[in-house]
Image (cartoon, helix red, strand yellow):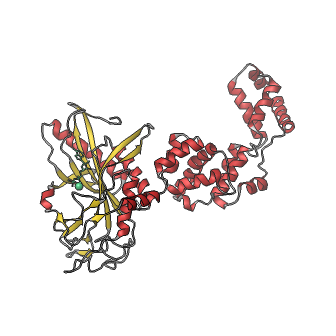
Amino acid sequence: MTGAALIKGHTGDWEVVIGLEVHAHVVSESKLFSAAATTFGAAPNSQVSLVDAAMPGMLPVINMHCVRQAVRTGLGLNAKINLHSVFDRKNYFYPDLPQGYQISQFKQPVVGEGVVVIDMPSGEPREIGIERLHLEQDAGKSLHDQHSTKSYIDLNRAGVALMEIVSKPDMRSADEAAAYLTKMRSILRYLGTCDGNMQEGSMRADVNVSVRRPGTALGTRCEIKNVNSIRFVRQAIEVESWRQVEILEDGGSIDQETRLFDPDKGETRAMRSKEESHDYRYFPDPDLLPLEFDQSFVDDLRAGLPELPDAKKARFVSEYALSEYDAGVLVVERETAAYYEAVVDGEGAGCDPKLAANWVISELFGRLNREGKTIAESPVSATQLSGLIKLVEDDTISGRIAKDVFAQMFETGTDAAAIVAAKGLKQITDSGAIEAAVEKVIQASPEQAVQFREGNQKVAGWFVGQVMKATQGKANPKLVNEILKKKLGG
Ligand code: ADP
Ligand code: MG
């Protein structure tokens, strides 16, 4: 195993071990067992059917769209799809769980073991095991801040389909956990099975953390519940692993418990001691038949999957000769990858793939980030960006001037060629004109000319700068260098 960032305690090194349970809302217009809508942000209790409110005698009816979404997700996670799976009742009391039990899957989940490849800065691929994926209902939401003495309940979320995706305890640092969540979100978004929006709670993670001496058996874990951003997951892992190390180094032991992360205080707090699965009295839900699939059902869903990030990345590396890093950055979001491909070989476009990657990653992403815009909101279309890159490729403008042109394109939405023509930015490639400029500079600076002949590199650079200045940056730099050498002998 690599990638372990060891904690240096005062009694020696400790290794952090992390397993994540990701709860992902299924993209579906209706709930897992009812026809009520699932729109985020709707008026409280406006999307609640009698089933969701758990009226006596109501029967759940499985929403096959949600089942297909779970199977597609399993396939996207390279996981085993179980042709036979079972819904169980998980019994516990919660004010926002009107049934008094949650319909979930326990011993026979719809998806079994799989694997996710995470992208680490080292470029070395790391595989994180998936233990299982099961379908379950979400609970409603208690609102404690609406009234000074009362609590309110909003059941819109009650019954919304959730996928719980459980990883193996394969991660060894906060960085790996962050990379895992980033990759998971990317895969879910490609598949369109979860929008991955952590602020809205569509995706949240329970973070299991333990520490051990390197090479020894797994330590006792604590589970930090419902962490709702990747940044908080990192912080929670940092503080929780240190908390455990300090207890162990003081001769204490870790109690298996459920904890909460408080981002304001930067600490985790005990919530409850860990319940065991037998506390929930799981049993097969008598209102629902087991899920039974034919292999052809699974095969058809597999055939309909889009190209996923890993495959796309590999293709970008082989087809466009991009670095692993550049390809990895471009494929995180499906829309970005599509934009890039449209720049390289879209209709009416077409340019050098490596140049295009540089432009998209540094210039376009940089500018979009500063403006808080998504790629869909880019004022510069893929075809327009391609047009600009082509002008650099055929030496119409220099790379330096292209950056100014790009800034104007971003502000005005105008094509590169039009800006270049209107502002007279076309590069000077006429060697006569450049020679004249070079001669003028040489005449004005005889001392520097001597130093240039003596091979002073700094002065050589200074000469290029002077000629560029004299031509408003429009001289072709390659020609400037050649002519300088010819005139001064280099
Ligand atoms: P539970 O219902 O008790 O939360 P699950 O099987 O749903 O159990 O999830 C257990 C999670 O804890 C998994 O993500 C697993 O990888 C992780 N885990 C198990 N043992 C350890 C350990 N010693 N240290 C860190 N994580 C662990
Ligand atoms: Mg759990």
Quadrant in which ligand 2 is drawn = bottom left
71 or 221, which lies in front?
71
409 or 276, which lies in front?
276
User: What's the residue at 16%, 62% (across, down)?
Assistant: 282
Q: Given the current orientation, which residue lies at the most extreme top position?
A: 454
Image quadrant where one finds the C terminus: top right
Position of 222 compared to 490: left or right?
left
109 or 409, which lies in front?
109
Expressed as whole percent of the image width and height from the top left, the position of residue 203 reads: 35, 59
Q: Is residue 101 above or below residue 211?
A: below
Q: Is residue 289 above or below residue 385?
A: below
User: What's the residue at 79%, 51% (across, down)?
Assistant: 424
Expressed as whole percent of the image width and height from the top left, the position of residue 449 reads: 78, 24
User: What's the residue at 82%, 37% (across, down)?
Assistant: 434
Any part of residue 260 in sight: no
Expressed as whole percent of the image width and height from the top left, the position of residue 18 reads: 28, 45
Image quadrant where one finds the N terminus: top left
User: What's the residue at 83%, 26% (across, down)?
Assistant: 487
Any part of residue 302 in sight: yes
